[in-house]
Structures are given as C-alpha cells and as structure tokens.
Image (cartoon, rainbow, N blue to C red):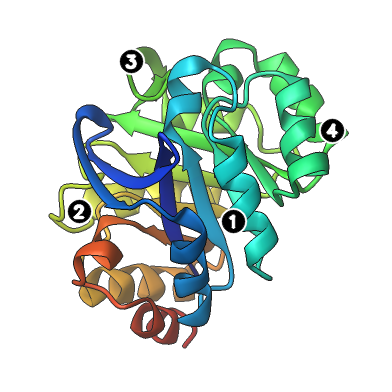
Amino acid sequence: MEILPAIDLRGGCCVRLRQGDYAQETVFGDDPREMALRWEQQGATRLHLVDLDGAKAGRPVNVAAIRSIVEAVRIPCELGGGLRDETSIRQMLEEVGIDRAIIGTQALKNPQWFREMAARFPGHIALGLDARNGMVATAGWLDDSQTSALELAKQFVDLNLAAVIYTNIANDGMMQGVDEATIQDMLRLADLGLPVIASGGVTTLADVERLASAARTQPKLIGAIVGRAIYEGTIHVADAVRIASV
C-alpha cells in the first residue's frame, strides 16, 4: 500500500482545513516546493496535491506552486481541485507534468464527459469520491448531492482509472482516526474491482497499520493519503511508508 503525503494549496501556501471548511484553515508553510522535497526525502513514492482555490473557482488557480513541486521532485504527483474541463486536465497532465488528474464534481454532474476523459487519458484520471454520510459532496465540499458514493462508483467500473480516492469528510483534518465504517466503505469500492486510495482521518501509525492490514486482504486498496498528521507530527512519513510496505 502506497503512502501519499498531502499538500493542500491555498494562496500559494501549504495549508490544511478541518472537514473541508475554508474558515478552519491552518497554514503549515509558505514554500510548498520545500515541503514536497521533505516528504520525498522521507520515502514517499507519490504526492497528493489539492488546489483548494481551484476547487472553489472551478479552474486551476495555484498553477505556479503546483509546477514548482512537480519540477522539484522525482516522484509522481496527483492533483485534485478545479479540474472540470478538458483544457484544465490537459494543462495539468501535459504542460505542468501531473501524473494523475483527480475529478470529482464533474464526474457526478456529467458522467458521460467523465467517461470521455478517462478514455482520452487512460490510466491518468482518478475519481475523487468525497462523501458526507455516504453521499457525494461536490464543489470543494461546499455542496451535498443525493447520490451515494458507491452508486456513483458503480457507473465507472469498466473504465481504466488510475484510482478512486475516497474521502470521508467527517474525518478529514479532525485527527480522530479512521473509523471502521469508512474502511468498510472503501473495501466495498475495492470489491467492485476499483483501485482505491483512502483519504481522511489517518492520524496515527495505528491507522496506517489498520489500512495496511485491510490492503493485505484486499489488494485493490492501493494507497492512503496522510495530511494533518504529518504536519502536526503524530505520523512520520518514513514510519508510515515502512508499515505500509510490509
């Protein structure tokens, strides 16, 4: 199972939100490039980038910061936030050098378009499933839908997706651990044959071990994103990588 340190970008800085609330922001650094290099040096094999301004604006905003990260590190980076048209996706994949484009809002609002993007960029499109009480949230988590995460994912099981990134918003940034119900949700997604990356709530090495244990029985659980925990020091990336790789 791969460990993906998260770098959330707002105003060019590295920040973390609580439950996706833009009013509950903590700034952890003004040099995202330096942060990316730190996680790479500690053994990360992939980075998870989020353009928070882009998620609200509906288009990439922190392009300069994203480009500086991609150019600085030797490991692949995935990006979510504001990727809602082909031009933005192509810009990030082909010009900036992002390895995976994560699409959330548009997959729900225009599933046919999402299918076309997955066909146009095979293996480089990831589905971002951000859920609140099992229902998909969109537009930077500002809006809730009436579609369950599992039902949305079922529409796309035939596509060549890089990953499905499942986030339980209730857990995200709260430092309260990954609850059993969320793990079961992710395993149900993996049972569909989709490659799943866990996101939200990974707080201690015990959380990493629980996810890694689940991944040993369900190899389609391919990764875990760690955010606030690595900035507040409750998880060291090198330790998480070691546990997840066993």
Query: Which residue lies at the image location 28% right of the left edge and 36% below the top edge?
Result: 169
Q: Position of residue 76 (x, y in %)?
A: 67, 62
Q: Amino acid at mark 3?
A: Asp
How far separated are the C-alphas under marks 1 and 3?
31 Å
Mark linked to residue 144: 3
Q: Which structural element holds mark 3?
A: strand
In this rendering, the answer to whether 109 lies above or below 103 is above
Q: Give residue 171's quadrant in the image.
A: top left
Give the foreground label among 4 and 1: 1
Q: Earlier in the sequence, mark 3 or mark 2?
A: 3
Q: Earlier in the sequence, mark 3 or mark 4?
A: 4
Q: Position of residue 101 (x, y in %)?
A: 66, 40
Q: Position of residue 178 (x, y in %)?
A: 23, 56
Query: Which residue lies at the image location 44% right of the left edge and 80% below the top edge?
Result: 241
Mark linked to residue 140: none
Q: Amino acid at mark 1?
A: Ile
How far separated are the C-alphas under marks 4 and 1?
27 Å
Look at mark 4 in the image and give the residue it sits on: 119
Mark linked to residue 69: 1
Q: Going by the picture, which residue comes out furthest to the right?
A: 120
Look at mark 2 in the image and give the residue it sits on: 179
The answer to whether one can see residue 91 in this image is: yes
Q: Amino acid at mark 4?
A: Ala
Q: Which structural element holds mark 2?
A: loop
Q: Earlier in the sequence, mark 2 or mark 4?
A: 4
Query: Which residue lies at the image location 32% right of the left edge and 17% below the top edge?
Result: 142
